[in-house]
Image (tube, rainbow, N blue to C red):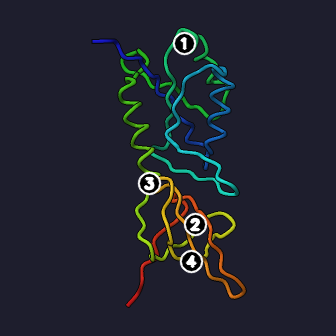
Amino acid sequence: MAATAAWLILELSDFLDNIQYKDIENALITTFGREIDYFIPIYYEEIGSYTSTSTLMDGYVFVKDSPEIQKSIGNIRDHRLFSKVLCDKGQYATISSRVIAGLRQKLKNTLKKKYKSGSRVKVLDGVFKGLVGEVIGVEDDGRRIMVRIKRVSREIIAPIPATLLELVMEIG
């Protein structure tokens, strides 16, 4: 059986609110260098004027362990985003690549939403924030939803990331 790579678990600071994906990514690169292999359990994608995000787990990021990473661990104290590297009995706590692969798959699955044509949805962010529209199609395996938004002066059909929509419950 082949050995699986170990991943270190970094805890994010509790003192910072609303830490964004790009902030975490920049802090990792600043701390460990551009060549690191990392996993931030937040999906982030810019789609046109929208930023689609989905959070699987708050408070932690994962860095693939290596001699170069071990040399740079002391640098996390220089960055306000990181609290510490998790330890167990005096050793750095690690998880396997298989666990990371499982987390990546779970995160990918959170992006897909099942909306039926005709469903009413509310846009949670972006240029159409707060508007309600009707689902007219599903694209990209449920990641992008085509929504028809009717306004007084016009009708808009827009592809909107599924992570930025919520189903509107009909009353009555």
Q: Nearer the viewer, residue 138 or 92?
A: 138
Whether residues under marks 3 and 2 lie with C-beta atoms below 8 angstroms apart, the answer is no
* Residue annotated with mark 3: 112
**Which structural element holds mark 2?**
loop
- Give the quadrant of residue 125: bottom right
Mark 1 or mark 3, which has the lower sequence index? 1
Mark 3 or mark 2, which has the lower sequence index? 3
* Residue annotated with mark 4: 132
Q: Position of residue 145 (x, y in %)?
A: 52, 63
- Give the quadrant of residue 107: top left
Mark 2 or mark 4, which has the lower sequence index? 2
Mark 2 or mark 1, which has the lower sequence index? 1
Q: Position of residue 85 (x, y in %)?
A: 50, 24
**Which structural element holds mark 1?**
helix
* Residue annotated with mark 1: 70
Which tag is nearer the camera, tag 3 or tag 2?
3
Which tag is nearer the camera, tag 4 or tag 1?
4
Is 36 left or right of 106, judged from the image as shown?
A: right
Quadrant in which the C terminus is drawn: bottom left
**Which structural element holds mark 4?**
strand
